[in-house]
Image: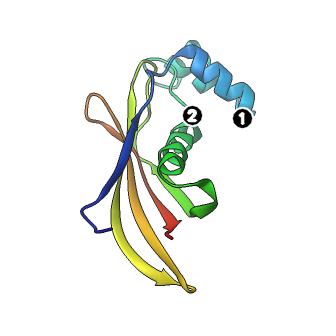
Amino acid sequence: MTTTDTIPSLTVAPISRETLALYAAASGDDNPIHLDPHVAVAAGLDDVIAHGMLSMAYLARVVTTWMPQHRLRSLRARFVAPTPIGAQPTCTGRIADVSDVDGERRARVVLTVRLSDGTTTVRGEAVIALE
């Protein structure tokens, strides 16, 4: 594994109102900026936006599709732009480095969520234990 290696990407379906409603119910995050267009517009947005943690869940999915979940040592994310309704996120990852930590070989993976228009919405990082 080298720092030029990438992990398989994940492109999810465009964000729909149904997706947001299902995520809100599952997560308990029913903030109206994610569900009510009137509240979103009053907040200065064009329409509702996706939950940031939904995008982070997609990052977790791209990592755990590549490697088993029990190898995940850490996952973090920084939300840099909102994900509007109708946007189609793609999650990608690149091996940044491989090192030995606590007697275990680990890869640090730089993660990105990018929309089809090129907007980056999330930057993240995962640490994965290697065999």
* Position of residue 124 measured from the top left corner of the image (x, y, whole percent): 44, 55
Distance Cα–Cα, label 2 vs label 1: 10 Å
Residue situated in front as seen by the camera: 65 or 94 = 65
> For the image shown, how many numbered marks are present on the structure?
2
Q: Position of residue 125 (x, y in %)?
A: 45, 60
Label 2: few (<14), some or many (≥20) within 10 Å? many
Q: Is residue 113 above or below residue 2?
A: above
Helix or strand or loop: what does disc 2 sit on?
Answer: loop
Q: Point out residue 56 in the picture as x, y percentages from the top left corner.
A: 53, 44
Please tell me whether mark 1 sits on a helix, a strand or a loop: helix
Left or right: residue 2 compared with residue 90: left
Q: Residue at x 51, y 65 (%)?
A: 128
Q: Is residue 16 above or below residue 82?
A: above
Q: Looking at the picture, does residue 114 appear above or below residue 123?
A: above
Left or right of residue 68, residue 88 in this image: left
Residue 31 in sight: no
Quadrant in the rendering for residue 108: bottom left
The amino acid type found where label 2 is placed reads His
Residue at image coords 46%, 24%: 44
Sequence order check, earlier mark of 2 and 1? 1
Q: Which mark is residue 27?
A: 1
